[in-house]
Image (tube, coloured by chain):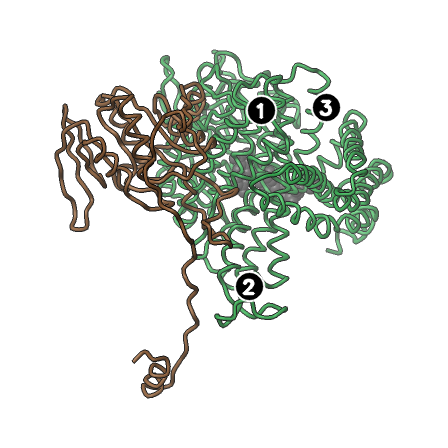
Chain colours: A brown, B green
Amino acid sequence: MKVLVAIKRVVDYNVRVQVKPDGSGVAIDGVKMSVNPFCEIAVEEAMRLKEAGKATEVVVVTIGVEKAQDQLRSALAMGADRAIHVTTDAQMQPLGVARVLQKLVDEEQPGLVLMGKQAIDDDCSQTGQMLAAILGWPQATFAGKLEIDGDKATVAREVDAGLETLNVDLPAVVTTDLRLNEPRYIKIPDIMKAKKKPLDKRPLDELGVDLGPQLTTTKVAPPAQRQPGKKVADVAELVSELKERGLV
Amino acid sequence: MPVYRAPVRDHVFVINELIQFEKYAEALGYEDGDADTIAAVFEEAGRLADEVFFPINQSGDEEGCKLDNHVVTVPTGFAEAYKTYCEGGWAGLTADPNYGGQGMPQVLGVMVEEMFTAANHSLFLYMHLTHSAAHAMHGWASQELKDTYLEKLVSGEWTGTMNLTEPHAGTDLGMIRTKAEPNGDGTYSIEGTKIFITAGEHEMAENIVHLVLAKLPGAPEGTKGISLFVVPKFLPTEAGEPGERNQVFCQSIEHKMGIKGSATCVLNYDGAKGWLIGSENNGLRAMFTMMNSARLAVGLEGSGKAEIAYQNGVAYATDRIQGRAATGPVNSNKPADPIIVHADVRRMLMTQRAFSEGARALAGEIALNLDITFKSQDAEAKQVADDFVQLMTPVAKAFFTDEGFNAANATVQIFGGHGYIGEHGVEQYVRDCRISQLYEGTNGIQSMDLAGRKLSINGGRAVKTYLATADALLALHGEDAEMADFVKPMLPALESLKQATQWIMDNRAANPQNTGAAAVDYCRLFGIVALGLQWVKMARVCIDTLAAGTDEADFYQNKLVVARYYMARSLAEHSGLLERIETGADPIMALAAEAF
Ligand SMILES: Cc1cc2nc3c(=O)[nH]c(=O)nc-3n(C[C@H](O)[C@H](O)[C@H](O)COP(=O)(O)OP(=O)(O)OC[C@H]3O[C@@H](n4cnc5c(N)ncnc54)[C@H](O)[C@@H]3O)c2cc1C
């Protein structure tokens, strides 16, 4: 079984981002970028499936700027067999990504698509669900545990009430949650090996994918600063303060 | 809670942008010396430092090592971290591929050490000593010994130690008493006591390989009569696996000021079986092969400590609110401003940062010259590089660790009384850094090595070349108005270094104490000027990169601001140091010994 893993280049989780003064977005110039942590978990899970003999090939894919190649190399160093880089400078949105992935799924015919449950930059948590829908495949999101048995997958999902266990037929889309696994540390020889693994560049506009309706960002603003508090002497003063402000 | 993030971006800056190692890689035969690979390795090393080394730094200090019936237990988590490090191939990063090493350049090997030791000084010592032992064996041991030990050391399956010190012989190794009697079968029987042996005993690895200095029967007096032996904790079997227990046991471990997670052992050799490394009575030479790299590694303990101290200083200074900025409140919705608004706090942070980044750049240049020394085909280039390494190693060891200690101390100051309290974790850096000024040759001895041996060897060729190169660098950029802020202040500082060098050369004959009297100040002066020259080069790169356009303008602009700070303040010491050097030994030696 071939596993396709979709990963995203995002601002590193340690960076405290700043909103651009013109409100058009957050400033990411020169900021440290990394593989989205949930996507890294997806790559790790794919590697474990391969090591357990359940997967035969692991293909990683990303859609994004030229530099996103660094994140693909990092996934290749974790052990993925080859990479596809759909290159574009455009800001991608979940539906567009799902449609591009649909096209690649058609070409690659994987038995399983693994992806992070959400990206830590926009926190959309939509792409996996959309991809399953347009492929007409089963989906199991927020996986905390994944077992493959022949053409079926058992997935323990992390939901508000606890764990929900699903059985899905393969091929399917599975999105990964934080506790699924702990991604490995990359070994130095694997960094060298990764340089020699195939990395296929596919310009987005040559794929002929209609990205669908796009959302427009009208404004990005930081949360309002907290105002300083005030100490009141007694209940009477508190009540009059509240009245003054029209709060009671 | 203390913080640490390996400064990966700055490492990439030094190796890929400042030194541009890629330009040298091919000629030096490094296939994997391209900028992308270097960045990827730094990235991964940083991750290991942040996520594996650092989280057990403070707990390791609190827990310390324990000894029970010759068995040492290291702090919780150390064994697992050691395993992760070895599995990643880090133990053999720069080692010979013939013995399972990765064969990567020194510019990687040296620079990642800063991250590891900053994140956890004690833990990294176990790795560092192993690396040193492998290095010494690679240079001097017979093929048979190499075949037995090197692969195990390079993989980290076995760890190494260096056994020089004895109770009555520290600096003065000529006085050691440990004996080696030939057994008649090519092996030796080792008898004696070694003290202060780092990583001398633990159970993180299946075997420990002790490299031991000892005297053969009838050996010449002093340092000319010392030989080097390999003495394993378990004697290797035919198959090369740990076999019978050798007669070397840890008798006690020291209770000490810092690096509490590192086992500092008294080792008793009671007829332990050993094998000679290199030729008889040539042990110190073999030991000195690895001493250069070990000294540089100790230097990085200092610069690494400055980095972690700086990061914690910044974190606290932006969080702690006390008092108001002299220019008026900046935080009017809070009762006070963060202490980073105060000039005196800024002064400490800027001093730390200007040193730490400057030292990183100098370490990069030393590492590059190590690569050239090891790999260049060009005999002249090799000699120039080796001269540079020899000259700068004592500077890196002594100046970096002195300044690292000062930086750690400054962070305690930034924290105020809270810095003195254990739970904040910053007093640990002061205690840990203190050892770096002592071991691997005290900083006094390093300075004397610089002012004495290194200035006189080959007629002072190394220092003359260094000063001429510095002149050329300043002349090259002196024409450029944009560089004036950096070149101008450097001119008198370089002049002070030249004058001090000349003074020592001219006055060492007149009074044999003059060199020793001047040494520590001279080494500091050398360090201050050497970092200044690095800041000149860094300023050049920043100006050029900004002119060419970059999406990281802040990074380069901020570096220029720090460069200006260095020129304005850190450099200023040069004239005082020169003045002191030129007073010679007389004021120091005037008081009669009995009058103390
Ligand atoms: C925690 C720790 C770990 C260590 N790890 C190891 C290890 O793994 N292996 C090992 O072999 N050793 C190790 N050492 C020993 C260390 O290298 C020595 O302590 C150091 O070299 C100094 O020797 P000493 O303590 O005997 O001091 P001394 O040699 O007695 O020096 C005392 C003072 O006199 C000065 N001095 C001595 N001689 C001269 C001179 N000729 N001119 C001017 N000044 C002089 C020194 O600079 C110093 O200030 C370790 C020590 C410690 C504390």
State which mark lies toward you, 2 or 1: 2
Tell me the residue that label 3 is attached to: B384
Label disc, if present, on residue B249 of the rendered structure: none
Task: Examine the rendered structure and indicate whether residue B538 appears above or below residue B159.
Answer: below
Decide which of tag 2 and tag 1 comes sooner along the chain: 1
| Quadrant of image for the C terminus of chain B | bottom right
Q: Which mark is residue B339?
A: 2
Amino acid type shown at disc 2: Ile
| Amino acid on which the number 1 mark rests in the picture | Lys
What chain is tagged by disc 3? B
**Element marked by disc 2:** helix
Side of B317 where A143 appears, left or right: left
Q: Is residue A217 left or right of residue B372?
A: left
Kind of residue indicated by mark 3:
Val
Classify mark 2: residues with Cα within 10 Å, few (<14), some (14-19) or many (20+).
many
B25 above or below A25? above
Q: In the figure, is residue B274 to the left or right of B440?
A: left
Q: Position of residue B36 (x, y in %)?
A: 51, 28
In the image, which disc is placed on residue B215? 1
- Sooner in the amino-acid sequence: mark 2 or mark 3: 2
| Chain bearing mark 2 | B
